[in-house]
Image: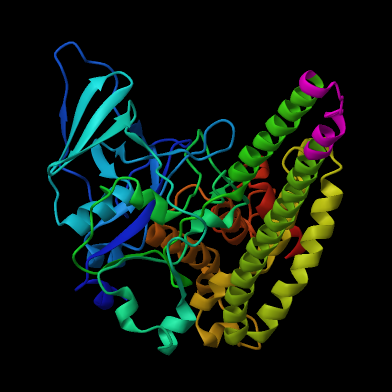
Amino acid sequence: MASVLRPGRVVLGYALTFDSPATPSSACVQHPLGLAVIRRDDERGSDPFFQASGVVCSLPLLTRAAGASGFLNAAPDPDGLLRRVPLLAAFNGQVYPGLALAAVLAAKKTRDVSLRVINVNTASLAIDRESLLVDGKSNLLLRYRGAKRTFPHASAADVLSGRTPAAAFTDKIVFVGTTALGTARSRFDAAGHALCGRGSAGHGGRQSPATRLHSPLPSTASPSRRWACWRSASSLRWSSRGSAWSGGAAGAAVCLAVVWGGTGALMSTRGIFVSPLFPTLGLIASFGTIGTARYILEHHRADREGHDKVMSQRLMVQTLLSLTEVRDVETGRHSRRTQEYARVLATRLATNPEFRAYLTPERIDLLASLAPLHDIGKVGVPDRLLNKAGLLTAEETVEMRKHPGHGRDVIEHAERDVGSSDDAILAMAKDIVYTHHEKWDGSGYPEGLRGPAIPIAGRLMAVVG
């Protein structure tokens, strides 16, 4: 993949986080802007962009090969509609571009960017000779374009099979795939764009990438060469969706005005009274029904997405579990049995007031799904020990007891590769893998933890394992 990305003008996406403690980004490769911020002498307020506290980055190998990147964050307004996107954000003392801005810079082959602060609510972003008005935090108002499917779509299957000709992408800006930001529950904005439901402090929403790009591009701009924005290999798309909803509301308002105006005209000119009440109630009821149906459909769709996410997690667990079965069939069977044991024990323990706050139904489900991974570290134990029929020697026992550390190292290595530092699923997985051989009296291994110092997930696995 890196060799494919390296010769092309490719921009990778990543996510900034705003609700967690500041974390170092040593595992991440990002591409900051050499941004010049111009202020008047009397304008010395806060920085004109948001300050991030962390980052969820792409694989460093791919980001280095691409040579450019931009953050994917966007935020709906308090009413749930996405009307603006941030073009700039700061992290660890550097300023970074949003995906839309990074795409424009790649298309225009420039890095000459400056931000002129006009007042506390307004600033002007200059890209070469073009200027864009943004708000006091470098947010750009979205410029929606056309109806649904204004930007053409091409499926990855058609591209890979050759059914879509290469000429279809000539002189085009291409957005490839989707992102992990879209795995949470989502809803749609007024123009039919998907919004990710995991926004935090207004920074988690997701919206059509093509509309984001179209907004900062001048109306006459036409990228002269082909380039691509790589995010994941699920589909190739340019996506901008219009909305019939606002048009329908305008049409309904016109109809109501005609009905009420016509009623008044008949009454004043001919003395004929026709009540506009029932047409008005009928129209309101129709819109209410449509709105309710839309909400129900969106709710079901979000549930399906949640189900798909759970299935993806289960697939991940089962894939890792299959790895242990390849090394040792009995270890794999034992790991599968612990799944139901863990669920039963955790459900029972949740009735105890001391554990009720921690063992929520969601956490019990997660614990049960991760339980089979507790012996994954045995993939690092030599076969001669795993398959030995008799008792282990003292030296062999020491080697065998290293498997909790091996398992934790596997998970931490994955965390470093993707730049994740606060994922709840991986945190519980590490507790299970590393502490399931600890004992209440401190005689366990590998740390010899005692009593409450052992994580609850580890305590449960020590019993069922």
Q: Nearer the viewer, residue 88 or 426?
A: 88
Is residue 381 left or right of 442 when viewed as pictured? Answer: left
The residue segment tinted magenta is: 268-283
Q: Is residue 273 magenta?
A: yes
Q: Is residue 363 left or right of residue 343?
A: left
Q: Nearer the viewer, residue 376 or 106?
A: 106
Residue 304 coordinates in the image, percent (x, y): 70, 61
Quadrant for the N terminus in the image: bottom left
Between residue 318 and residue 441, name the one nearer to us. 318
Give the prevailing secondary structure in the magenta stretch: helix
Image mark count: 0
Residue 464 is situated, as x and y percent measured from the top left of the image, at 76, 62
Q: Is residue 123 visible?
A: yes
Please, is residue 134 above or below residue 229 in the view? above
Q: In which quadrant is the C terminus drawn? A: bottom right
Task: Determine if residue 439 is in view.
Answer: no
Query: Relative to 228, is 184 above or below?
Result: above
Name the residue located 76 percent from the left edge and 59 percent from the top edge. 463
Q: Position of residue 27 (x, y in %)?
A: 32, 55
Q: Is residue 25 left or right of residue 199?
A: left
Q: Position of residue 47 (x, y in %)?
A: 28, 25
Residue 64 lies left or right of residue 49; in this view the side is left
Q: Residue at x 36, y 56 (%)?
A: 13
Q: Is residue 433 magenta?
A: no
What residue occupies the far top of the structure in this picture?
Answer: 42
The residue located at (45%, 67%) in the rendering is 177
| Foreground residue among 318 and 207 | 207
Q: Residue furthest front?
A: 270
Identify the image's colour scheme: rainbow, by chain, secondary structure or one colour: rainbow
User: To which quarter of the image does residue 49 belong?
Assistant: top left
